[in-house]
Image (cartoon, rainbow, N blue to C red):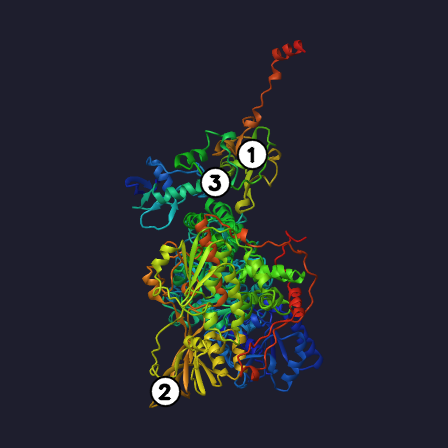
Amino acid sequence: MARIQDIAAFNAARETGLEKLMPTVPRITVGMGTCGRGNGAEGLYQAFAASIDRSGADVVLAGVGCFGSCYCEPIVSVRLPNHPLVMLKKVGANDAGRILQDLAGGNITPEFVYCRIEEWDHITGHLRYGSGYPEVPLWNEVPFFKGQRKLVLRNCGFINPDDIEEYFGVGGYQALYKVLIDGRPETVIEQVKASKLRGRGGAGYLTGNKWEFMAKAKADQKYVICNADEGDPGAYMNRNEIESDPHSLLEGMIIGGYVTGATAGIVYIRAEYPLAVRRLQRAIEQAREYGMLGENIFGRGFSFNIDIVEGAGAFVCGEETALIASLEGHAGRPRPRPPFPAQKGLRGMPTNINNVETWYNVAPIVTRGAAWFTEIGSAKSSGTKVISLVGKVQNTGLVEMPLGTPLKTYIYDVGGGGVDGLQVKSVQTGGPSGGCIPQEMFDTPVDYESLAQLGSIMGSGGMVVMDEDNCMVDVARYFIEFTHSESCGKCVPCRVGLNKSLRILNRMTEGAATPHHIELLDDLSRYIRECSLCGLGQSAPNPVLTTLRHFRNEFEDHILARRCEAGVCEELALSPCENSCPLHMDIPRYLQLYKEGRHDDAFMAVIMDNPLPSTTGRVCQHPCESRCRRKTLDEPVNMREVHRFIGDTMLLSERFEEVAARVAARKLDPTGRKIAVVGAGPAGLSAAFYLSILGHEVSVYDDKPEAGGMLAFALPEYRLPKAVLRREIELIERTGVKFTLDTRVGKDISLNELDDRYDAVFLSFGTWKEAAPLREPGAELKGVYPALHFLESVARGENVQLGRRVVVIGGGNAAIDSARTAIRTGADATVIYRRERKDMPAIGAETHAAKEEGAKFVFLAAPHRIVGDDQGRVKAIEVVKTRLGEFDSSGRRKPIPTGEIQRFDCDSVIFAIGESVDIELAQSAGLKLSHGGTIEVNRYSLASSRPKFFAGGDVVTGASNVSGAMSYGKLAARSIDRQLMEADRWKSAMPDYQFDMTPPDTPSESRRHRGRELDATVRAQSEDEVVAMLSHDETLDECHRCLRCDLSVANAT
Amino acid sequence: MPNKKLSIRIDGALVDAYEGQTILQAARAGGKYIPTLCDLEGITPVGGCRICMVEVEGIDRVMAACTSPVQEGMSVKTTTPRLTQHRRLTVELLLVERNHTCAVCVSNGHCELQTMATNLGVSTVRLAYNFPKLETDLSHPKYVLDHNRCILCTRCVRVCSELEGAHVWNLTSRGINTRLVADLNGKWGDSKGCTSCGKCVQACPTGALADKGRAVEEMVKQNDRISALAMRRGAEA
């Protein structure tokens, strides 16, 4: 090919390219980026080539770059002449033959279909593929692409990066042609300035200004450099851009070189990107061959060359002065600025350095103009930014959106939200120099200023999504470990400061830190940020400072409670199940004790960890199962049913007396201290039990006629038989706890009296008030019930006249319990919930059971008004249909009323829409309340604002669950005891068992045992317990299924 | 041609400065003190120790006086509570990074780090000591390199290359593992390039580079060398 010198030759090259892109025969492409190759694209390409050879079909096969959807590699595109381009996903080498066969018949193999593209705006050109296949979604109808604007990635995944003619075909090098023919560099600089293009490497400096600076500098030699030293963990957009479309980079650099008066260009690229290096090398050779590089380009007297320099991978070499030092053959250590590279750069000559992605924006701006560019994006940050979306989201990959798009769009709409139903907690932007942004702030637009305000940065565009399983202290530690090992060592703050930060963070994750370490870490981080010499040190503390700012609780948990809620920091947890259990039951211990046949020990281990083992064995939300490592093999161990079995077999048997005596015998010597517990719900019962075991004299007050709180009055009999609960309460009584029932604190006895008579008071009177008075028109009608009142009435054995048709409003456990209870009275129940099924807070199994029993569900509807008959009784309810709008701070979409009204005839309506604390009692006691209307306490001691008064359970958290409330009771007991006795006596009261610490043999797949359920038709008619206990053999099997995560190399025998 | 004369303020006082000077140079010429460690007048500044950080009015960031050029009308503050806090932390970090045991150091009483700590009132450190295990290079016939005392100021590197032209010293590795090395990480005594001029020893602010024979360990008493004693002992035996 002769060098292109005129428009005719240029157009000819373009025509050749177009013919390759849209041939008159079918064309198949395979995405051959590093990511595609990692997923088998090379084998797939070979398979296609072999199939085509064998069949002799006239098909064009090409390797192209990456289309961005990492989550469904390898990606193949197929196109028949005059038809849309269809993208296929997750194609394996074995599928090649079939796809070819189908294509020969004019068909697209349906199971691989991803999306179709009818036309594509390459910015520098426009291709119309054709229309058809209406059953295949258009590319921007696929959630991952919705809202994406491919400007930088305009050619990625379409053209063969090794073929310059295909680049010509999409309008490549036209911008360069235009610039050189016009011959007015200053207009181009003006245009770039007017476009407000900002450096995409992270700092966001205006590119036009930088170019102007450089253009004005006078010297014999001037350089433009492309910084392709992409080193942020989790960021790979630059690699992908170069691998998929190297010529766009070259074109940008040649234009930049021309307008700034540079004499040579250099691409400084990491050696770890061999494929990108190879493709860029090939692109440079072809560009020379076609006359886009070299002497006298387009005959306009401008000569320019680009060389590649491979960097050895030091992170600091992304800093421009360190990059220059590295190019000069020195160690990659930065030097202070000024002088700036534009004055004194490479070899002392004026030098302009831009990030890969900045260069990709040059040709579009030249082609379409500055005004077009500024229309995209936000006011201060125009254009788009390519983000690499990775971590705990369903759809990962490269996402190019206009700047200013809110974070939640990336995470929920494009990313599809959390994986495995886990909540997204935070997102880390900008790599090691960036920060962590909490989920409550996902409304933040992604642009330079907004991210900086939150203490993070845009950086190169890495976005690492983190969920509940990520520990933020560990995340901070990880990034400091990275920057610490990448620090060049030149300046003290970065070299020593980061080393000390890392050591402090290490201590925190090991549970060996003290509260003053938080302050020290904060001081140190601010100092490093202010005093470091270069950008690496100045920004390295950002991950620490942002996590300290937004996730301080987690740091305090690690230090004060020695807990890592995410279960990441191994030293702080016995096992994942123990860590996730609100009561921190030593689960592996009771499983092992039972396995060893030590049933009495197993019972004692259980009851001392959890005083209501049979109740929680039935109704706990069992967070342990979601963390059980066994689930990676088959299914989680049924830990809940095992402690139910252990509890039931002792408590409900003739051995009760003996067992109760043994538990009571564990009591420590009487201390003479008297403690009052207000509220006999799960929190109060647990506190009373442990305080009594610790030797105190405990009195429990409750206004209900029976102890148990919600367990007795809100949980229906078929889920928790009252006989079981009564036995457990009896055991607590045997330890010496006194119950004073039918006594309302605040009325029958004042808090001041309690203050006088007792050494400490624990408040756990729960949330029995309706969260908000019912405001719906018709709420005053007969037949409208708040869920708790309804459940309580049924529990008290009162005859509630529901009628035949019942509507339940709500999606939590109270709603499901109400519906199932209503069904047992012979009614038909319909549950109406304003969001979707997956958003329901109720336990999934309970919802499922309700459905089996005949409950109907209506989603996306909210109450509008209740219609009454002339006797003032409920006749019907009108609901307004909702649609899901934007994501709110809970990570769920907000329901928005549509105005469409639907009517349900019914005889009664039960509202289960949340409960709240009896604020008057708390206020009259002089207790400080939180914004949410709950009692404010110290998270670690549960001490309230009033001396001697502690609080826990729902009064602190708002309506929650059994094990959560019990954990407060347990913590309060320990804390009250420590305060009264001025010593931590907890361990002395707890049993200590020796048991087998041999790791189990390599496990094989096994079935999980479940409690048998009564048949749905039978149970809907009865109050009998639905789920039966496991058998002894099944229990033993479950114990054997435990993988013993509590063992570590250190304590294995 | 002399550079353009500028007028700047340092701690409120007007000071004459010349275009191209650093803040530190202007301060010294004007008789104002800014503490330094890695700086040595006469060789290229590197801005590594960050002790000389100063505040400039209108700029949020603190700036290294040794590498920041003066600008017309700038107003510099050399001592503020924030700067003192930063300087103290810098000294603390240097003290915990390696093994600075003043009592047994050859430079005890003549050490710039020690003086800096004294001047800034750093009598204790809040951070844990690193206590790294470091070597001492005794291979040179005249001098000693003790990594335990090195603060990586690179004064030795610069005097050796800029003044002596021998380029014996350099730094190897990075981050907390950065070490001063002779030649290509060889023994100092094996260096063909070293002229034994001793400039590095004189430039070193601490006891990292020192004349041989001065260390506490080398102060072994040898009373058996007293011949009269030996005779008496012999007579008694």
Gap in angstroms between the C-alphas marked 2 and 1: 96 Å
- Amino acid tagged 3: Leu
The kind of residue on which mark 1 rests is Leu
Q: Earlier in the sequence, mark 1 or mark 3?
A: 3
Query: What's the distance in space between the residues labelled 2 and 3, CA to CA?
Result: 81 Å
* Residue B80 position within the rendered picture, expressed as x and y whole percent measured from the top left: 34, 43
Frontmost of labels 2 and 1 is 2
Residue B196 occupies quadrant: top right
Q: Nearer the viewer, residue A517 or A47?
A: A517
| Residue receiving disc 2 | A873
Residue A637's place in the image compared with A551, above or below, is below
Q: For the C terminus of chain B, give its image quadrant.
A: top right
Q: Are marks 1 and 3 on the same chain?
A: yes
| Residue on which disc 3 sits | B94
The disc at residue B145 is 1
Mark 1 vs mark 3: in front: 3
